[in-house]
Image (cartoon, rainbow, N blue to C red):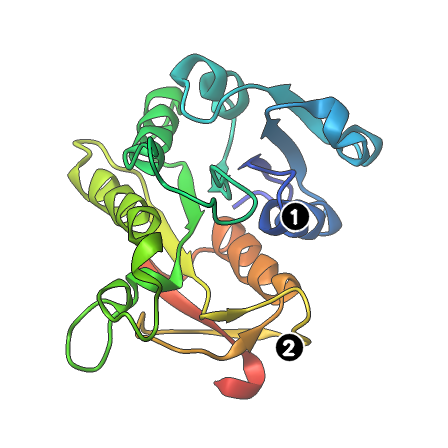
């Protein structure tokens, strides 16, 4: 495995995406970032990132960003905060992002790592978190269903490359101060996890894969 890799980050301007991008850059890798507007994130070019402007659901735009990638990290979100209403929300959003990635990459050896949603984790009784109104607001279920369709798209692809969905716990927070991380089975947790620890897990799994399918990332102190 080469020391320096070419990593594409979709959604590099978001909270998770920016933390992931900084982590990958800090490890000395070459980064291409797909964002809607480079002008909104001037620090990317200032950090030596190759910026591609485009829509993460558009195969042509994604192809320009992932063509030469060794790994693709999907940190895209359709909104920065839960909207007042999901009227008109396209639940195929993440499915279309995965479709665009699969259409754009040139090799089945490309690793895909995507940031998941805690609402899709399993409870001890086998239900998913999104089905428990005490743990997940019913009004947000369209967003959970959209994330669930992302996994189905990866599983259904006829030539799916190596992939992993890294799922943060419900306690993911900008205020959390967790030191390091561990990967665990994807069952519900409300542990407090920092974005830096999430970024470390995603970046490590993109460059040095240890798992496939899905994994919960927990702060090291919770491991």
Other-residue count near label 1 (Cα within 10 Å), few / some / many at <14 / 14–19 / ≥20: many
Q: Are marks 2 and 1 in contact (CB under 8 Å)?
A: no
According to the image, label 2 marks what residue?
A: 178
Residue 189 at x, y = what percent? 40, 78
Residue 14 at x, y = what percent? 62, 43
Residue 9 at x, y = what percent? 56, 37
Answer with the quarter of the image where residue 120 lies. Answer: bottom left
Residue 5 at x, y = what percent? 59, 39
User: Looking at the image, which residue is at 71% across and 24% down?
Assistant: 38
Answer with the quarter of the image where residue 136 lies. Answer: bottom left
In this view, the residue in front, 204 or 192, is 192
**How far apart, in angstroms, are the residues tagged by discs 2 and 1?**
19 Å
In this view, the residue in front, 82 or 148, is 82
Disc on res. 58: none
In this view, the residue in front, 213 or 170, is 170
Camera-side mark, 2 or 1: 2
Determine the secondary structure under disc 1: helix
Determine the secondary structure under disc 2: loop
Answer with the quarter of the image where residue 198 lies. Answer: bottom right
Residue 163 vertical placement versus 95 (above, below): below
Residue closest to the far top = 60
- Which comes before the other along the chain, label 2 or label 1? 1
Disc on res. 24: 1
User: Looking at the image, which residue is at 66% across and 77% down?
Assistant: 179
User: Looking at the image, which residue is at 47% across and 41% down?
Assistant: 74
| Residue 160 in the figure: left or right of residue 136 | left
Residue 198 vertical placement versus 96 (above, below): below
| Residue 19 in the figure: left or right of residue 34 | right
Residue 41 vertical placement versus 111 (above, below): above
User: Looking at the image, which residue is at 47% across and 37% down?
Assistant: 78
Residue closest to the far right = 46
């Amino acid at each position: 495995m080469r020391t320096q890799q070419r990593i594409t980050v979709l959604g590099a301007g978001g909270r998770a995406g920016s933390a992931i991008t900084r982590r990958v850059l800090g490890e000395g890798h070459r980064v291409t970032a797909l964002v809607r507007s480079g002008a909104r994130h001037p620090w990317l070019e200032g950090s030596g990132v190759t910026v591609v402007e485009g829509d993460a659901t558009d195969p042509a735009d994604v192809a320009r960003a992932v063509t030469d990638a060794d790994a693709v990290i999907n940190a895209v979100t359709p909104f920065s905060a839960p909207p007042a209403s999901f009227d008109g929300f396209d639940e195929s959003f993440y499915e279309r992002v995965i479709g665009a990635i699969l259409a754009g990459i040139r090799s089945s050896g490309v690793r895909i790592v995507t940031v998941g949603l805690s609402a899709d984790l399993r409870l001890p009784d086998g239900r998913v978190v999104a089905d428990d109104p005490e743990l997940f607001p019913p009004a947000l279920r369209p967003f959970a269903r959209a994330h669930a369709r992302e996994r189905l798209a990866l599983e259904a692809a006829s030539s799916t490359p190596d992939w992993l969905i890294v799922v943060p716990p419900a306690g993911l927070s900008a205020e959390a101060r967790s030191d390091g991380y561990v990967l665990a089975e994807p069952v519900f947790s409300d542990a407090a996890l920092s974005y830096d620890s999430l970024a470390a897990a995603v970046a490590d799994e993109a460059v040095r894969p240890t798992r496939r399918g899905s994994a919960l990332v927990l702060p090291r102190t919770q491991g």
